[in-house]
Amino acid sequence: MPLAVELKKYSEKIRLVSRNPVKVNETDELFPLDVSDFSKLNEAIRGSKVVYVTIGFKYNLKVWQDLWPPFMRAVINACKANNARLVFFDNIYIYDKSAVPFMTESSLIRPPSKKGMVRSQLHGMIMDEVEKGGLTALIARSADFYGPDIRNSLIGEMVVKNLMKNKKAQTFGDPDKIHTYTFTPDAGKATALLGNTSDAFNQVWHVPTTKDRLTNKQWIELIASEMNVKAGVQKVPAWLVNILGLFIPVMREFPEMMYQYEMDYIFDSSKFEKRFGLTATSPSGGVKEMISALKRAAHFDFAQ
């Protein structure tokens, strides 16, 4: 949704493609599509100048291995056939474990996880086509995120929802390690800007991400303070994640990603900031907006 909001600044013609698309802007065109039906991707892309891929398949390794590569191949082919530029919104799984304490666009590509290997394959598919001259594309990369829509974010699921229920916030790994987060409206604004800047293509960009080096514990305290609740913290160790995976399918997918929470996680977006003069929303400002949106949507009063 943040991307569609921002794209309205550049064009009145926005086509939203998903299984059950819903208008974000009044003039949006809706194109219902089961993205596993690759035969209709060309029709979905036809007439587009820029194609933004922000889809998130089910968080399951086999699903990723089975669907991501053929989906991306079909998107690339459709973009080439329709002379459309491609913007792929990606995450940090592609980087070597040693890069996580300070990630830049030039960090070593050597994923330590199987999901990361899938992301690396997608990166290679896109950049190979760029190098051959058959595709104009860019990759916009984000850190872990937080924002007004807390669904599908660890902060939303493990911190905000637990605090709403007067439970302890949960965190993977070491809560005293630094963890930088990307505010979703910032990501939407940056991705729309990149897609509408000709000289931004054929390279990788990190979208604006906070420079404040807060630990996960400090993020939890900031969120709890804004909600006016107690900031209890429960560390979820690797052995417990493995046990939970026996009962909760999605938890089976987390152990290979735990390395990200056992060390400092600093995502550098200096390249974008220097080029465009835009910086990330402050953690206090982003958290305030996140909680305000939640209150408006759910009519919660967090005061005890």
Image (cartoon, rainbow, N blue to C red):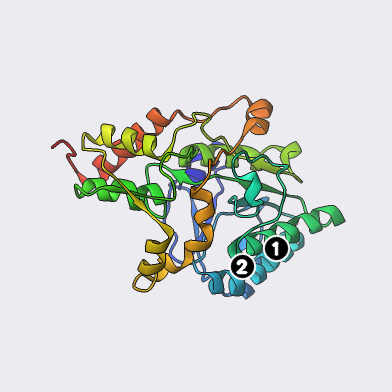
Residue sitting at 51 percent across and 36 percent down? 186
For the residue labelled by badge 2, is the local secondary structure a helix, a strand or a loop?
Answer: helix
In the image, residue 294 lies at what x, y percent? 28, 43
Which corner quadrant holds the C terminus? top left
Residue 234 in sight in this render: yes
- The residues bearing labels 1 and 2 have C-alpha atoms spaced at a distance of 9 Å
The answer to whether residue 90 is above or below residue 32 is: above
Q: Position of residue 53 (x, y in %)?
A: 60, 56
Tell me the amino acid under the disc marked 1: Gln
Query: Residue 187, percent across and down?
Result: 53, 41
Q: Which residue is mark 1?
A: 121
Any part of residue 82 in sight: no
Q: How many neighbours does mark 1 have within 10 angstroms: few (below 14), some (14-19), or many (20 or more)?
A: some
Of callouts 1 and 2, which one flags the residue occurring earlier in the amino acid sequence?
Answer: 2
Residue at 80% x, 58% y: name it: 129
147, 176: nearer the viewer: 176
Residue at x 48%, y 66% (from the top left corner): 253
Nearer to us of marks 1 and 2 is: 1
Does 137 sit left or right of 63 as displayed? Answer: right
**Residue 68: mark in rendering:** 2
Question: What is the three-letter code of the residue carrying label 2?
Answer: Trp
Q: Is residue 243 above or below residue 297?
A: below
Q: Secondary structure at mark 1?
A: helix
Return the residue nearer the eye: 142 or 86.
Answer: 142
67 to the left or right of 174: right
The numbered disc on residue 249 is none
Pointers 1 and 2 in contact (C-beta within 8 Å): yes
User: Of residues 213 and 65, which is closer to you in this image?
Assistant: 213
